[in-house]
Image (spheres, rainbow, N blue to C red):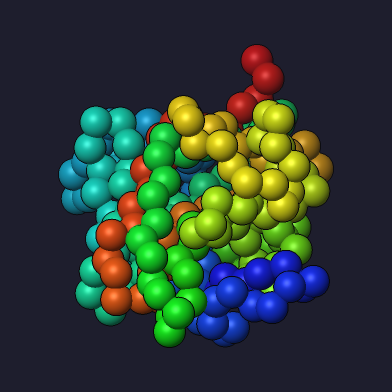
Amino acid sequence: GVGSPAATPPSVTPGAAGIGNSPSSVTSDESSIQSILNGDFSDAVSTDPAFGWTATGPVTLANGEATFGEGGSQFADLSQTFSFPTDAKFLQFTIDSASFGDNGPDAPPDAFEAALLDPTSEASLVGSAGLNDTDSFFNLQADGHVYFAPGVSIAGVASGDVLPMGGPVVVSVDLSSLPSGAAGSLYFDLLGFGPDNSSTVSISNVIVDTGD
């Protein structure tokens, strides 16, 4: 689920359905899992073998981006279980745009999260963003504040800062301590809580960098 810094009052509902409890969680035989597929979102046909992703709720792939929206009873979730290639250094993704609606005083604000979990235990493989009730390594709040785990880096931004969205923002996650060939389940979630269904987030270029 999504949370907020322990030093401040919770900004969203504790225990809300989130990344660790996604219906698309996968428990798989690691020997059969390939490296990440369709990270450039060039294949938008979910029935294609190369599509790679499991989408839940209002998620659209087009023009090299995955766009998360609001609507209906489900959070927008995109996930994939994959194996880490030899000498994996970083997992990276780009936030191309993020806009959050105003939920007013009677509903928690929306948020966008990313997590990388063990496919079997669902424990985080790269730590958490330091928020309550979440297994995410990255959390972007509706007011622009961003929180991320110690192994995560964004150029010129520290955890707890307001994320500048004047252009694309690259998020990098250190994978150097994870064994090659191990599997991970990657989740992206837009968590919408209020009556305003105008929140949208677009991401692109999900890659695993081996440093080659």
Can residue 159 be spotted in the picture?
Answer: yes
Which percent across, then down, holds residue 19? Answer: 52, 67
Taking 195 as reference, is 137 left or right? right
Q: Residue at the spot x=49%, y=59% of the render?
A: 142
Q: Residue at the spot x=67%, y=54% of the render?
A: 147
Which percent across, then down, holds residue 143? Answer: 53, 57
- Front residue of this view, candidates 47 and 72: 72
- Front residue of this view, candidates 11 and 41: 11
Examine the image and state in which quarter residue 196 appears.
Answer: bottom left
Q: Residue at the spot x=64%, y=78% of the render?
A: 10
Can residue 37 be spotted in the picture?
Answer: no
Q: In this view, does 33 lie above or below 122?
A: above
Q: Is residue 46 above or below residue 90?
A: below
The number of discs equals 0
Which percent across, then down, holds residue 129? Answer: 71, 59
Q: Is residue 166 above or below residue 70?
A: above
Q: Name the image quarter holding the N terminus.
A: bottom right
